[in-house]
Amino acid sequence: MPHKYLDQGAGFIGASSSYEESDTVIIGAPMDYTVSFRPGTRMGPGSIRSVSEGIEEYSFYLDKDLSELKYCDLGDILLPFGNVEASLHAIQETVSSILAAGKSPLTLGGEHLITYPIVKAFAQQGYDNLTVIQFDAHADLRTDYMGVDNSHATVMRKVAEIVGSPNVFQLGIRSGTKEEFDYGNKETNFFPEDIVSPLNQVIEKIGERPVYITVDIDVVDPAFAPGTGTPEPGGCTSTELIKALHRLSELNVVGFDLVEVSPMMDVGDCTSLLGAKLTREALLSFFNKCD
């Protein structure tokens, strides 16, 4: 068990299995050191866990129940506040140890930069042909943000450097610089604004390759998810995102993260509740070993 960096707290609903018997492991990465607008995503993992008690373990969409799964919640990774490099190292080492034990990681953020060390951990564990699917309002393809290369605004450019830009699929993008859009249109599989109509093409192109999915909650229109640090009007509905995750269950998903939930900016916990529901649907869609 990767206990070196972990602080056990209240767990996600239904996470009652031991680490040893679990197929899937939930961890929190409460990091928001490089956010460029409104901070507070470090509190996202705790808030998602807390409100998860307000949703059911049963998904009527899938006719599946969390009681069918063997998963645990190890709590939050202990991160040295303000130290970006050391925090990225702690995240990578924690995820790498989970993968080495033959388990699937589901990570709650935290800012989007946490996806970078997670993908590095997959590469470290031999996932050479990994494909990454990003749901996001922002392209996150900058080479640097105000002279800093490790930023939530550069995360997908850094991911592309690890897995190769043709193995990056970006859905729902509706914000970025002209240079980012030019890079995305030329180098990645780039689908501005829409998250639904590209899915047939995405699934067919990826095939049987292992897939990592990263969901930035701001892909959803702020009318449905105001609790995020960089809200961008014009996004998808919460229902569309849930249905998109269900469609991707056809793929060989090996890991998942949900990032950028900021409880300080939320209204009535609706964004955290959406985060909890997306987490439940991800668990049942991608990591149900009982099918």
Image (tube, rainbow, N blue to C red):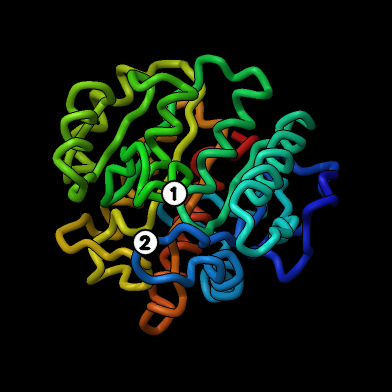
Q: Earlier in the sequence, mark 2 or mark 1?
A: 2
Q: Amino acid at mark 1?
A: Ser
Figure quadrant of residue 46? bottom right
Q: Is residue 161 left or right of residue 81?
A: left
Name the disc covering residue 36, or none: 2
Residue 243: horizontal and vertical position, in percent? 32, 47
Label 1: how many Cα within 10 Å (few below 14, some 14–19, many 20+) = many
Tell me: residue 229, above or below residue 247: below
Q: Secondary structure beneath disc 1?
A: loop
Q: Amino acid at mark 2?
A: Ser
Residue ID at (22%, 61%):
232
Tell me: residue 112, above or below residue 30: above
Residue ID at (28%, 58%):
220
Q: Which residue is mark 1?
A: 151
Residue 184: horizontal and vertical position, in percent? 23, 30
Report if the CB atoms under discs 2 and 1 are less than 8 Å apart: yes
In this orientation, which residue lies closer to the viewer: 106 or 35? 35
Q: Is residue 44 left or right of residue 215?
A: right
Label 2: how many Cα within 10 Å (few below 14, some 14–19, many 20+) = some
